């Protein structure tokens, strides 16, 4: 339900896969992220907390996908996330876990915070 948009930027956590498990982990990642065609795998420049720059693989939203929602306003996305679920669980649980993980790492994304707040107020 959430995706990076081409040309945008985000703060987050870059994960490094150990060389001895990269083939297995990439296969699992590919199965999870590319199954429905909603993402475009994209190599992107990343600046780490150390200031070092690396290239990383990101999954960017595919605007040509039939389920791609062009209205990314908080209200629309919150409404869609609240009722969406997939093979790995509810989208609301995913967004709330993402929000909590960002907080635990000292990061804040105002957009995710707003969606999480909307989800929490709907569940009351």
Image (cartoon, rainbow, N blue to C red):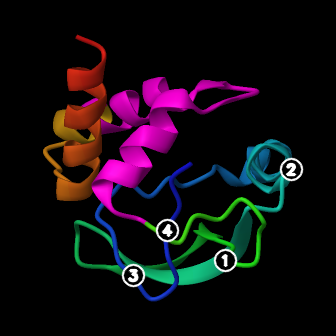
Point out the residue furthest to the top here: 124
**7 left or right, relative to 31:** left
Task: Indicate which disc residue 4 carries.
Answer: 4
What percent of the width, then of the height, locates residue 50?
Answer: 23, 69
Which label's residue is closer to the chain start, 4 or 2?
A: 4
Say if the magenta span includes residue 89.
yes
Q: Is residue 90 left or right of residue 102?
A: right
Q: Quadrant of the C terminus?
A: top left
**10 Å neighbourhood of mark 3: few (<14), some, or many (≥20)?**
few
**Range of residues picked out in magenta:** 72-100
Q: Position of residue 78 (x, y in %)?
A: 38, 42
Is 40 within the magenta? no
**Foreground pick, 72 / 50:** 72
The residue wearing badge 1 is: 63
Which of disc 3 and disc 2 is earlier in sequence?
3
Q: CA distance from mark 4 to mark 3?
A: 7 Å
- The crowd level at tag 1 (other Cα within 10 Å; few <14, some 14-19, many 20+) is some
Q: Are marks 4 and 3 in contact (CB under 8 Å)?
A: yes
44 is higher (above) or lower (below) than 74: below
- Element type where label 1 sits in the image: loop
What is the distance, in whole Å, between disc 2 and disc 3 at their CAs? Answer: 23 Å
Characterize the local packing of mark 4: few (<14), some (14-19) or many (20 or more) Cα atoms within 10 angstroms.
Answer: some
Q: Earlier in the sequence, mark 1 or mark 4?
A: 4
Q: Percent position (x, y) of residue 116?
A: 27, 35
Q: Nearer the viewer, residue 64 or 54?
A: 64
Q: Residue at x 71, y 59 (%)?
A: 67
Q: Which residue is labeled 3 in the image? A: 8
**Relative to residue 64, is residue 100 depicted above or below?**
above
């Amino acid at each position: 339900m959430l995706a990076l948009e081409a040309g945008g930027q985000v703060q987050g956590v870059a994960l490094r896969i150990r060389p001895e498990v990269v083939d297995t982990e990439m296969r699992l990642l590919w199965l999870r992220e590319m199954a429905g065609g909603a993402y475009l795998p994209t190599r992107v420049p990343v600046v780490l907390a150390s200031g070092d720059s690396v290239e990383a693989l990101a999954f960017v939203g595919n605007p040509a996908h039939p389920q791609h929602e062009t209205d990314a306003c908080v209200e629309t996305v919150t409404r869609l996330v609240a009722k969406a679920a997939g093979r790995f669980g509810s989208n609301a649980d995913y967004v709330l876990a993402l929000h909590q993980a960002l907080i635990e790492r000292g990061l804040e994304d105002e957009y995710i915070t707003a969606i999480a707040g909307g989800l929490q107020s709907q569940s009351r």
